[in-house]
Image (cartoon, helix red, strand yellow):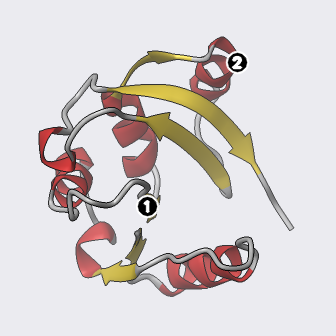
Amino acid sequence: MALVSSAVRAVETWQLIASRLPGGAQVGERVEDALYQADVGDVTDLLTSLDQDLEVALVVGHNPTLEDTVRALAAGGDGDALARLDGGLSTAAVAVLSYQGLWSDLAAGSCRLEAVEVGRG
């Protein structure tokens, strides 16, 4: 499931990402006005409301909120990813978190930071 801010640039970013997903990838999309001026609690609330059968969620939104959300959710993780996060999430950055549990139980410190990558162009 992709949770996408209703801001034009975020929707365009998601469309670009979606167009490059491997063939056959089934990804639902929810454009959320709430992500435009969200705080960490708002993003977490959207994630905890996801269908429990979903295995993967993607959030396309804005900083500093997304960076703050990654920091709040990650209890630790890959050393390189943590070092990259220390430099901040720049435009076009992707942070990958892993989580074992129900979406409804997602909370601060319940995830592991697996990767931080920047892809432009």
Query: Is 18 located above or below residue 52 in the figure?
Result: below
- Residue 52 appears left or right of 121: left
Report the residue at 24% width, 36% height from top: 101
- Residue 53 appears left or right of 70: left
Looking at the rendered structure, the kind of residue marked 1 is: Val
Report the residue at 68% width, 58% height from top: 92
Q: Could you tell me which quadrant the N terminus lies in? A: bottom left
Residue 42 image position (x, y, % from top left) = 19, 56
Report the residue at 71% width, 83% height from top: 19
In-front residue for pair 19/9: 19
* Residue count near mark 2 (Cα–Cα under 10 Å), binned few <14, some 14–19, many ≥20: few
Residue 78 placement: quadrant: top right
Residue 117 image position (x, y, % from top left) = 72, 42
- Residue 23 appears left or right of 10: right
Element at badge 1? strand
Report the residue at 86% width, 68% height from top: 121
- Which residue carries the number 2 mark? 80
Cα distance in 3D space between marks 1 and 2: 22 Å
Sooner in the amino-acid sequence: mark 1 or mark 2: 1
- Which residue carries the number 1 mark? 59
In-front residue for pair 59/38: 59
- Of all residues shown, which one is farthest toward the right? 121
Residue 16 image position (x, y, % from top left) = 70, 80
* Residue count near mark 1 (Cα–Cα under 10 Å), binned few <14, some 14–19, many ≥20: many
Residue 59 placement: quadrant: bottom left
Residue 103 image position (x, y, % from top left) = 21, 48
In-front residue for pair 6/114: 114
* Mark 1 touches mark 2? (CB < 8 Å): no
Query: Is 77 located above or below residue 98 in the figure?
Result: above
Element at badge 2? helix
